[in-house]
Image (cartoon, grey):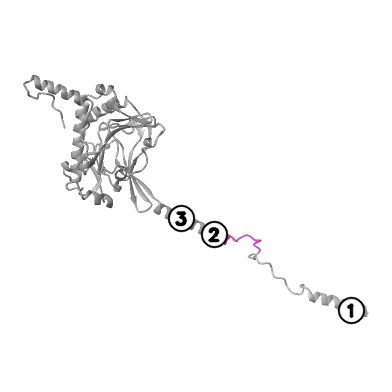
Amino acid sequence: MSDGGGSVRQRKKSSGDGTGSRPRKPKSTTSSGGSSSPSTAQQHQMWARIVLMVGIVAIVYFTTFRTREKKFATQREVLELRTQPLDCSRPYLEEISKFAGCIPNRCGRFVSDKIVSPAEAGILLDLARAGFELGQSSGGASILDLHSGALSKGTQFVNVYRLPEAKRLFTNQHINVYRHVKAKVQQAVADHFRLSVDALHLTHPTFFSRLTNATAKTIHDEYWHEHVDKETYSSFHFTTLLYLTDYGKDFTGGRFVFIDNEGKHNRTLVYIEPKRARVSGFTSGAENLHHVEQVTGGVRYAITISFTCDREMAMADPKFALDDEEEEEEKEAATENGGTREGRVREP
């Protein structure tokens, strides 16, 4: 009996020592072991935070790094005059202030379809095509400088006036129209920026350009890089372009693009679509950072006509290969007419 009673007491004691006499606490679902998944409410909160963060990043990106586009002149428009005034860059203003009569009332840019006639542009296009028959760049960007005679040929340059064919290709009409158009563009720059036309001088380089989509062969073929004219050519103070062919008709790509920086990261791209006889002009300082888009098809012809306020950097009208021959003819005609000079009247 005692042994039996002792056994009972022992079982009770063992039972008291264990955990069975107390209710066990359930394991927490948020224990550090992480064995349980988040609740539905926690998942919703997590996704709300992710969406908020993505929204903040998007807002910061689009307000900090923003590029806008603006069309300054389209091919379909016929513009009497369109202007965009800008503040002059400090280095440009400091330099140009030395030249009396050549200080712009304000820096900026303009475009007009009424300075040069389509007929004049057509004659100059004929001149350009005739010149480029004698030589073209193998890399798609060819130039013809009638002042120095430089003509692209392969990956080099030749002097066009040393080629016998030049006398046959460059006619008297070509020469006179070129000089007349240059004078009209010079007057337009003086009028727009309120300069004395006599203080404005033609400067080097002034040239025809022919652009195609051929792969660039040398650094001279890479015309599409952003640049400031004053930094590329120290003599430049005012830059003009006369377009000889039509964007979207004669070629694709090849628009002229100003890059206006507003703050560190905001940029506005201002486009000019080339059009035959269209003239664009602008101050050559850092206020007019620009480039030309790559031509994707066809052929783009234009003339860059550049001006300086520094008389020491001026250059005369081109001395064409024809001139010597014409002067001899005029001298002979003057002699035959008793010393009077009854030759052809040549425009300046």
What amino acid is found at the position of numbered circle 3 in the picture? Val
Q: Is residue 309 left or right of residue 297?
A: left
Residue appearing at x 24%, y 23% in the figure: 167
Q: Which residues are magenta?
A: 33-48
User: Which of label 2 and label 3 is nearer to you?
Assistant: 3
Residue in the picture at 19% in, 36% down: 184
Q: Name the mark on residue 46.
A: 2
| Depth order, front residue of 10/230 | 230
> Which residue in the structure is indicated by mark 3?
57
Q: Earlier in the sequence, mark 2 or mark 3?
A: 2
Tell which residue pokes out farthest to the top in this image: 336
Is tag 1's residue or tag 3's residue first in the polypeptide sequence?
Answer: 1
N-terminal of the pair, mark 1 or mark 2, is: 1
Tell me how far mark 1 sits from mark 3, CA to CA: 77 Å
Q: Residue 14: name its quadrant.
A: bottom right
Locate residue 292, reporting x and y percent: 34, 39
Labelled pair 2, 3 in contact (Cβ < 8 Å): no
Name the kind of residue labelled 2 in the image.
Met
